[in-house]
Image (cartoon, rainbow, N blue to C red):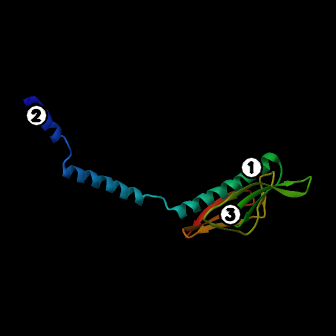
Amino acid sequence: MSRTIKNELKLKASGYSLLEAVISMSIVLAIVFIGSSLRPDARKHQLQTAVNQIYSSLSLARFRAIRQQVPVKVSFHENFCELSEFDSQKSFWVIRSRRFLEGVEITANNEPIFYPQGTVSNLASIKVSNDRGLYLITIAITGRLKISQSD
């Protein structure tokens, strides 16, 4: 019978003390606070995502123009970026893709047209902004794209 009493005493002594529980809780809270401070800023993320999407749309337009041997135009309407190909048989532009760019304001001074030689006419400067910053995307006559951040 003395063995069972010893076993019961060992079971009661194997729990956590109040001090161990408080230390564990404080470590968990510290991890939560550190994690919440590292959370990405949603508005800044929207701005960077929009810039990346515009850059990829412009690159895609140049690629399509070279690959399919047709002019490809990139236009910006409100929060949308459209890629249109010129249909020479019907003599008008056909929209091939349209992207919605959330949380940003886009202003472009022109609608660049990429040609099968890889060049571009209607040189453009595209401003992408929101309350977290401003980016400027410029297109050179050679089709080269440049992104710069303004303060």
List x then y, in percent, for residue 96.
78, 53
Label 1 crowding class (10 Å Cα cut-off): few <14, some 14-19, many 20+? some
Q: Residue furthest left?
A: 2
Label 2 crowding class (10 Å Cα cut-off): few <14, some 14-19, many 20+? few
Residue type (three-letter) at the residue carrying disc 2: Ile
Q: Which mark is residue 63?
A: 1
Query: Looking at the rendering, which quadrant does residue 34 occupy?
Result: bottom left
Residue type (three-letter) at the residue carrying disc 1: Phe
User: Mark 2 or mark 3, which has the lower sequence index?
Assistant: 2
SS type, badge 2: helix
Front-lying residue, 103 or 120: 103
Residue at horizontal 18 percent and vertical 40 percent from the top: 14
**Mark 1 → mark 3, Cα distance in angstroms:** 17 Å
Q: Which mark is residue 143?
A: none
List x then y, in percent, for residue 44.
54, 63
**Mark 1 → mark 2, Cα distance in angstroms:** 81 Å
Nearer to us of marks 2 and 3 is 2
Residue type (three-letter) at the residue carrying disc 3: Thr
Label 3 crowding class (10 Å Cα cut-off): few <14, some 14-19, many 20+? some
User: Mark 1 or mark 3, which has the lower sequence index?
Assistant: 1
List x then y, in percent, for residue 121.
79, 61
Residue at horizontal 56 percent and vertical 68 percent from the top: 133
Residue at horizontal 67 percent and vertical 59 percent from the top: 100
Which residue position is annotated with label 3? 138
Vertical position of residue 40 compared to residue 8: above or below? below
Quarter of the rendering occupied by the N terminus: top left
Q: Which mark is residue 5?
A: 2
Q: Residue furthest right?
A: 89
Vertical position of residue 24 compared to residue 112: above or below? above
